[in-house]
Amino acid sequence: MSATPSRPDLLLTHGYFLAEDPKEQAIMKPYVPLGILYLAAFLERAGFSIELYDTTFRRFADLEARLREGPPSVVGFAANLMTRANVVRLARVAKEAGWTVLFGGPEPPSWPEEYLAAGGDVVVEGEGEETVAELLPVLRAHGPDPAALSKVNGIVFRDAAGTLVKTPPRTKVSDLDSLPWPARGKVDIGRYLATWRTAHGAGSLSLITARGCPFKCNWCSHGVYGYSHRRRSPSAVADEVAHLVETYHPEQLWYADDVFNMKASWLVEYAEELEKRGLHVPFECICRADRMTEEAAAALARLGAYRVWIGSESGSQRILDAMERGVTVEQVKSSTALLKKHGIETGMFLMWGYEGEEIADIEATVSLVKDAAPDIFFTTLSYPIKGTKYFEKVAARAVSTTEWATGSDRDFAVKGRHSRRFYDQATKYLKNSVELHRLRSSDGAARLARIPRAFLLARLARMRLERFSDEVEA
């Protein structure tokens, strides 16, 4: 017989099950859940007993069994767009088994009524460290009593009458260096690295150097960190990288900051700190085009960046301005040119379907990708995320194609927008047009045989784009 698990002050978990997600298996690039690892480290330092149940390499039924086995205490679920359906199902299991249920992460603050109705007792807004540290003793002494909960800032709950109560927001952590490193010892880092090495030939680990993004792109969620930007000191980050290299030996890193190149001067200082420690680890990161300077690009190369991702979104300045991106098409071109100059690969994120986009805007995006020539580019169809300006703009026309508890904000159809078939052709037109451009610009006889096919595919997609332009989402 197996021993009954001890009763932790808090069981922390999430709802990402790699083995049960075919799309994620095709990508095979899992990273540790940094958010709850930070929270676990902070709470353990404060004296709480924390059990962290990492679902990444487990099955849904495994966590379901753990919750039913008990003994029940407080369980905290981190939820996002991808994991809503799993987390909601698990929360109901937890509630039936007698657990007090907390929800946190980027999505629950935008849907507090729904998450509370799904079995939650409390939704934690924003950064969780100080809020949960204050909340746990309250729950231990009083349970989810509304009168006691009302004294804790940064949470949402229901009062005795069932009315939604939102307490004042909590002040964000100002000194990120004061936080302990994520509790990576609570997850199987070796398995993460082995999964990466098997699928991609190199193991990758993630870390952050900052929290938040001050820019106000109106389709982007700021549910946890708001419009802030607080950065760790270069020496503190370098110490963590040294620890990761010495302890886990990754071949590369992923800096999971929203904007890694916020300040070129910080990058330069950070490069100096890594050089002091003899560290030069290849990495990927996301940068903004308007923050990319010669100094920043040179520092990124010096640090070991092998690929930098730019959120271009569109090649139409009209659409970029409507998104409130604060970036110009010329800055996107300039940033990719600077990165290439310093030997860094470029990746580009593109978004179809933003409000008001027409064929001329798609043509502009095709032209941008031809001119900027990123090494990789990905397209996605815009979707209105609850809590954003974009959601407010289209809310009256946004209709979910699934039940809330089983889908996500990605399932919203926007009435009157071009059809998904239209945007499928836009992607085909983009890919084949760019391929044709590359073939025409390259050398070698072998390319000549491929040009006619690329030309025909691009032309066919463009014709279908016109044909489907009158189709709209109903």
Image (tube, rainbow, N blue to C red):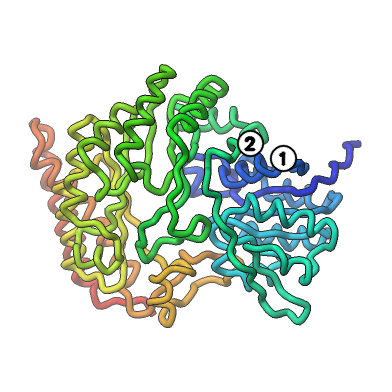
Residue 51 in view of the camera: no
Residue 214 in view of the camera: yes
Q: Which of these two is toward me, 182 or 385?
A: 182
- What residue is at 56 percent from the left and 33 percent from the top? 192
Amino acid beneath label 2: Ala
How far across and how far down the image is residue 98, in percent? 83, 60
Look at the numbered disc 2 and give the secondary structure of its residue: loop
Q: Can you tell which of label 1 and label 2 is closer to the viewer?
A: 1
Please give the label number shown on residue 27.
none
Look at the numbered disc 1 and give the secondary structure of its residue: helix
Residues marked 1 and 2 touching at CB (< 8 Å): yes
Residue picked out by circle 2: 183
In this rendering, position of residue 448 left or right of residue 430: left
How far across and how far down the image is residue 42, in percent? 66, 42
Q: Which of these two is toward me, 263 or 261?
A: 263
Amino acid beneath label 1: Glu
How far across and how far down the image is residue 221, in percent? 45, 61
The quarter of the picture where the C terminus appears is bottom left
The quarter of the picture where the N terminus appears is top right
In this view, 458 is above or below 207: below
- What residue is at 62 percent from the left and 53 percent from the top? 128
- What residue is at 25 percent from the left and 70 percent from the top? 357
Residue picked out by circle 1: 44
- Image quadrant assignment for residue 438: top left
Rounded to the nearest angstrom, the CA distance separating label 1 from label 2 is 9 Å
